[in-house]
Amino acid sequence: MFNWKLYIVVLIGFAIILSGFYINPIPIIEEDPVLETLNQPPVEPVIVREGNIVKIEMTAQVTNVEISTGVFYNAWTFNGTVPGPIIRVKEGDTLQFTLNNIDPNMSHSMDFHAVQTSPSKNFVDIMPLEHGSFTYSANMPGVFMYHCGTDPVLEHIANGMYGVIIVEPKDGYPTDNEVDREYTIVQSEWYAEHDFDAFLDGSPEYVVFNGNDFTLKEHPLLAKVGDRVRLYVNNVGPNKVSSFHIVGAIMDRVYIDGNPKNMLYGLQTVMLPASGGAVVEFVVNEAGDYPIVTHQFNDASKGAGAVLRVTADGLDTGD
Ligand SMILES: [Cu+2]
């Protein structure tokens, strides 16, 4: 016998299930709009000298930077640039350092390789929208890396939080009087954006000098025939070694890590471990374009190159 009551109950049940599909479509997962759109304009660092005290104020912030022509990376930065500002002080200076963290989403910190201090006391995390102040002595000359040391450090460095602090030796370098030009070159890597597995894998999309793969090729460093050129170089990694080389030149003086006591002669290539630095000097006796590369040519092919243009008058002729 046909059960009308059961038939109606089943019909109503199907109707409820079907209407549920229409009323409740697949939920849309919305990205956090703050994380997606944050692009904070660069904040100028403040660096003020009073005697042998140097007051330094820097800002941790999130800013889009151009890493290759038309390719932007939503970077974690010091002061909105990658690398962050070059800090230059003298051996024996006292650094009064303040870090302002204007990133609303993430703690950041500062680890200066140029100082000797307790990391658990003086390299500590600064919470979002807070600031912290620390005092250090810069007692060792050199070309030092600085970076955010917040865990996981790999993520903070790979996202752009690094730079260089040069501590000039109090008695100078033996070759100071012969140097005609000085430039600073920082090697680093860019991986797939915010992809921690790519950071771990260590196969970058770009390896660059001074933050991108085009500026130092389109706007060569300049020198005059006969000049002694000094480069302050540092490889901030985070993962690669640099085999720093100038095509057509021999580095007649190299100060490893920038310490005048670490003087080497006649190097074709200087090896820079991750975070390692050097002061390198060479003389250019003929006009022409001298490529500057890491001699690890897979990395050079990913962008790590610059041009030193040598002309009779030291000006860029544009051709
Ligand atoms: Cu950080």
Image (cartoon, rainbow, N blue to C red):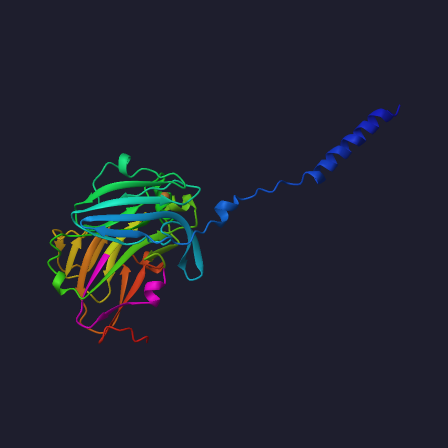
In the displayed structure, 115 sits above or below 39; it is above
Q: Residue furthest top?
A: 1
Q: Is residue 72 left or right of residue 313?
A: right
Tell me, yes or no, if residue 113 can be seen here. Answer: no
Question: Outermost residue, front direction?
Answer: 50
Residue 139 x %, y %: 16, 45
Q: Residue furthest right?
A: 1
Number of numbered labels in the structure image = 0
Nearer to the camera, 169 or 25: 169
Return the x and y of residue 175 as percentages of the image width and height: 12, 61
Give 72 or 88, whichever is nearer the viewer: 88
Q: Say whether residue 227 is magenta.
A: yes
Q: Position of residue 302 (x, y in %)?
A: 36, 58
The image quadrant where one finds ligand 1 is top left
Please report the residue visible at 32 percent of the width from the left and 40 percent of the height from the top.
132
The residue drawn where x is 36% and y is 58% is 212
Task: Look at the picture and state if 25 lies above or below 249.
Answer: above
Q: Is residue 7 left or right of residue 57?
A: right
Residue 253 lies, in percent from the top left, at 14, 59
**On screen, residue 277 above or below 25:** below
Q: Is residue 281 above or below residue 137?
A: below
To which quarter of the image does residue 314 belong?
A: bottom left
Nearest the eye: 223 or 289: 223
Q: Splitting the image into 4 quarters, where does residue 304 fall?
A: bottom left
User: Split into 4 quadrants, where in the image is the C terminus?
Assistant: bottom left
Q: Image quadrant for the N terminus?
A: top right
| Region rendered in magenta | 213-232
Residue 212 in the magenta stretch? The answer is no
Q: Is residue 88 visible?
A: yes
Q: Is residue 122 left or right of residue 27?
A: left
